[in-house]
Image (tube, rainbow, N blue to C red):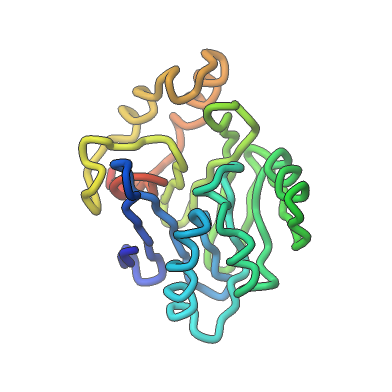
Amino acid sequence: MEQIKIFDDFYEFSSVNEGFPITFNQYLLIGEEPILFHTGNSTHVKLLVPMVKELLGDKPLEYVFISHFESDECGGLSHLLSNFPNVKAICSQVTAMQLKGFGFTNELIIKKPNEMLKSKDFKLKFIGYPSEMHLWEGLLTVELERQLFFSSDLFIKRDKMFEKSADSNWQEEVTNLSIQQIPSKNALQTLQNSLRDINVKYIATGHGPFLKL
């Protein structure tokens, strides 16, 4: 797992998958209320936790954002909790239902599209995400102060998969979303309409390079 400093208070952690040409990315925003974006799977998280602990020092991890219920988004949750027992999960209602069904008993912060979560260090706005391929209700989020969008499984540059960063264009990324990613014409159009007018400078992808716009 590689640790990449993006801003003074923002880090990416990237792992290369064995046997399949893809990377898995998690992100940490440090401040008075540190927040982790995704846990990685049960293998990733064991590499991730020591790095997070070193960066946080004496600070506890306050939040973990989970865009949707899938192994690389929340498969490492139990190990994360064993090291940060008071962490609160931010997720959709559907994801919360799944987490409870798998025995998650910590505080859940359930958010809906267009709702906000504010702290001294960040201002998150949430966007509905019909997470592939089951179209379960998930969430994407944008950190408004940094104009930083967390795209989960969208906007993957497969031709630049192993590059640390790449240049891109927001409107092109949104326009190029396809039925293969969101297998419902109505859900795809709704998502694109939700994304078009967001003011974004960076995309923190779940896979592949960090995108600069």
Residue 51, image x, y percentages = 42, 74
Q: Residue at x 56, y 81 (%)?
A: 59
On the question of residue 37 being in view, the answer is no
Q: Residue at x 49, y 84 (%)?
A: 57
Residue 118, by quadrant, is bottom right
Q: Residue at x 75, y 63 (%)?
A: 106
Comparing 203 with 105, the one in front is: 105
Q: Which quarter of the figure is the C terminus placed in?
A: top left
Q: Which quarter of the figure is the N terminus placed in?
A: bottom left
Q: Residue at x 52, y 13 (%)?
A: 185
User: Taking 143 as reference, is 15 left or right?
Assistant: left
User: Taking 147 as reference, is 164 left or right?
Assistant: left
Comparing 86 with 170, the one in front is: 86
Residue 172, image x, y percentages = 31, 27
Residue 144, image x, y percentages = 49, 51
Q: Is residue 164 above or below residue 121?
A: above
Residue 199, by quadrant, is top left
Residue 115, image x, y percentages = 66, 44
User: Taking 197 as reference, is 15 left or right?
Assistant: left
Of all residues, the one furthest to the front in this rendering is: 19
